[in-house]
Image (cartoon, rainbow, N blue to C red):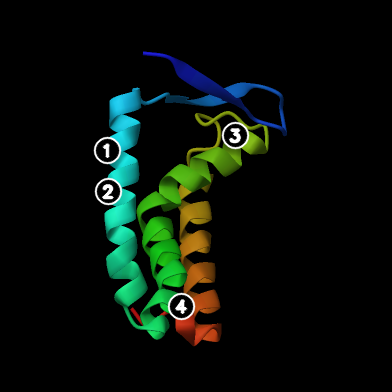
Amino acid sequence: MESIQVRNPRNGEFDYEFEVPEHEVLVRRAAALRAAQSAWGASPVEQRVDAPGRVHQQHLARAADSIARRVVVDRYRSLSEDSATRPRIAETIQKRTTIFCSAHPSFSKW
């Protein structure tokens, strides 16, 4: 299967890649998204307004360690040398997310 590499603009290295879906898979995904759009459009506007914050908060909670690893890489430190810093970075991300969401109540309703 074909993949597309993504270059990190900060250091010029290819550090991510994703597979190009086959045509049939792409068609199925598009159809599922179109079907979901009907339900999304029928939901109350308040729920739709709050959705990005909900998703963002859930994503950060799941990805805090991964984000911390990337921050360490972006700062040009080796992961083995900086393993003690990653938990602190992840904790900081979670704390700041909590602070942001409390300052912006529409992000924390869900």
Q: CA distance from mark 4 to mark 2?
A: 22 Å
With respect to residue 95, does 63 lie above or below? above
Q: Counting residues from the N terminus, which is met first, the one under dot 4 or under dot 1?
A: 1
- Tell me the kind of residue under disc 2: Ala
User: What is the crowding at mark 4: few (fewer than 14 residues within 10 Å), some, or many (at least 20)?
Assistant: few
How many other residues sit within 10 Å of disc 3, few (<14), some (14-19) or many (≥20)? Answer: some
| Callout 4: SS | helix
Q: Position of residue 85 (x, y in %)?
A: 53, 46
Secondary element at image label 3: helix
Q: Quarter of the image containing the C terminus?
A: bottom left
Q: Amino acid at mark 1?
A: Arg
Q: Residue at x 41, y 75 (%)?
A: 48
> Does the CB distance between marks 3 and 4 fall below 8 Å?
no
Separation of disc 4 and disc 1 at Cα? 27 Å
Whether pointer 2 and pointer 1 mark residues with C-beta atoms closer than 8 Å, the reply is yes
Q: Residue at x 54, y 21 (%)?
A: 5
* Residue 71, horizontal then vertical, whole percent: 59, 43
Q: Which residue is mark 2?
A: 32
Between marks 1 and 3 in the image, the one whose residue lies nearer the viewer? 1
The disc label shown at residue 28, or none = 1
Q: Earlier in the sequence, mark 1 or mark 3?
A: 1
The extreme top residue here reads: 1
Q: CA distance from mark 2 to mark 3?
A: 36 Å
Q: Nearer the viewer, residue 29 or 109?
A: 29
Type of amino acid under label 4: Val
The three-letter amino acid code for the residue at tag 3 is: Val
Q: Which residue is mark 4?
A: 49
Residue drawn at x 60%, y 21% as measured from the top left = 14
| Residue located beneath label 3 in the image | 73
- Callout 4–callout 1 Cβ contact below 8 Å: no
The first of marks 4 and 2 along the sequence is 2
